[in-house]
Image (spheres, helix red, strand yellow):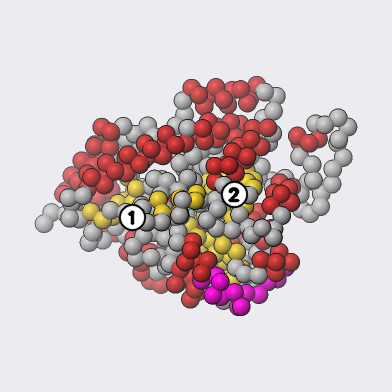
Amino acid sequence: MIPFSPPRIDQKVVDEVSAALLSGWITTGPRTKLFEKRITEYAGCKATVAVNSWTMGMQVLLHWWGIKAGDEVILPAYTYCASANVIVHAGAKPVMVDLNSDDFNINAEKVKAAITPRTKAIIAVDIAGFPCDYEALYKVIEEKKSQFQPTNDLQGKLGRILLISDAAHSFGATMNGKRTGVLADISTFSFHAVKNLTTAEGGAVCFNLPDSFDAEAIYKHFCTLILHGQNKDALAKTQKGNWRYDVEEPGFKCNMTDLQAAIGLVELDRYQENLDRRKHIFEMYENGFANESWALLPKYKDERRETCYHLYLLRVKGVTEPQRDAIMQQIFDRDVSVNVHFLPLPTLTAYKKRGYKMEDYPETWNKYSNEISLPVYFDLTDDQVKTVIHAVKEAYAAVIKD
Ligand SMILES: *Cc1c(COP(=O)(O)O)cnc(C)c1O
């Protein structure tokens, strides 16, 4: 069976995690701090806070920004549930918006139509690793600036809607020569086991706010917020006699450990190699399906943007959702694992119950109903890619007999 996206775990990772385990420091410590520094350098952002998941990084971010009951946060209807769940937990209303027709990302004009005086943030999701049109989103935010109603000093200081990037898929993707991490005000990465770069579980929040914000001060504040609001972490307390601490406000508990950072440092060191391999796999799929009239190939590059080759979202022209499911079953029967990214939020019980209706997001349905995600990962060999391509073609022919 060809798996869908196993992590790249080899002796190098084992050695680095063993070294961390035996170092005498297993929670947040020197490796986590180094990992944060390396991500800041790689992304080119002003500061990075490592956390235990994208989800908790985003939860703390929404808390820090002052999101509360009565507020609205805009996001695409087509994303993983985490993007919406954090908004619900903050007490605010997720306002779902439909997609562009030519890619899987949120549509800026539809965002514009959804903005109200209650809109405090936009979470744009770089689906499959392809960056959203952040230039168009900033333009819309600027156009709606006079409507913005800040409810705290931080929001007053920015004076507009905060643009957040859900960069869970897009570590290393670029727009106008800049990497994700600096394309929005704040970007959040996921280092979950299936993502391009993994720490088993983990995430990072990258700050790129305007220069009027003190990035170092925000970094320090965030470090306390992810550790109960305690003003001294375990590492600081190891200094002789430095035991007394204070809690300035009740915080969360979602720091990254040095064991996770040890994996992340290895992954980051060889990330380019990973990107190159993934790009090669994308190109093999592209060539493999180029002559199939039924194959709708995903956009992963344009004049401004290039993906980080996270997910290959193949679509099958003209098929219904049950036909797509049948094709997937045929692919599985040929020992190839495939997936769907994603079940649209309005199809999930939690969001149906909150009144969201699938028919309000036709482009999302159009993308979802005929989509099949193919395996992409470093250890996938050329022969396996050929097997996948062959299995998909056979599966299509088995289901669609014309
Ligand atoms: C994986 C994922 C998340 C959640 O990441 P965690 O690190 O598991 O919390 C959020 N958004 C998108 C689009 C994802 O794919």
The reply to whether the magenta stretch includes residue 141 is yes
Picture coordinates of residue 205, whole percent (x, y): 60, 49
Kindly indicate whether the residue at mark 1 contacts the one at mark 2 (C-beta within 8 angstroms).
no
Picture coordinates of residue 333, whole percent (x, y): 25, 40
Relative to 242, 80 lies left or right? left
Q: Is residue 380 above or below residue 316?
A: above
Disc tally is 2
In the depicted view, which residue is nearer to us: 4 or 126? 126
Picture coordinates of residue 310, whole percent (x, y): 41, 45
Who's the residue at 49% across and 51% down the image?
A: 178
Picture coordinates of residue 372, whole percent (x, y): 31, 51
What amino acid is at disc 1? Answer: Lys
Specify whether tag 2 is near ligand 1 (CB below 8 Å): no
What amino acid is at disc 2? Answer: Cys
Q: Is residue 1 visible?
A: no
Nearest to the eye among marks 2 and 1: give it: 2
Label 2 packing within 10 angstroms: few (<14), some (14-19), many (20+):
many
Classify mark 2: helix, strand or loop: loop
Residue stretch in magenta:
140-152
Q: Quadrant of the C terminus?
A: bottom left
Who's the residue at 78% across and 36% down the image?
A: 236
Q: Which residue is mark 2?
A: 45
Q: Earlier in the sequence, mark 2 or mark 1?
A: 2
Who's the residue at 69% across and 58% down the image?
A: 213
Q: Is residue 97 above or below residue 247?
A: below
Label 1 packing within 10 angstroms: few (<14), some (14-19), many (20+):
some
Q: Which residue is mark 1?
A: 299
Relative to 60, 381 lies left or right? left
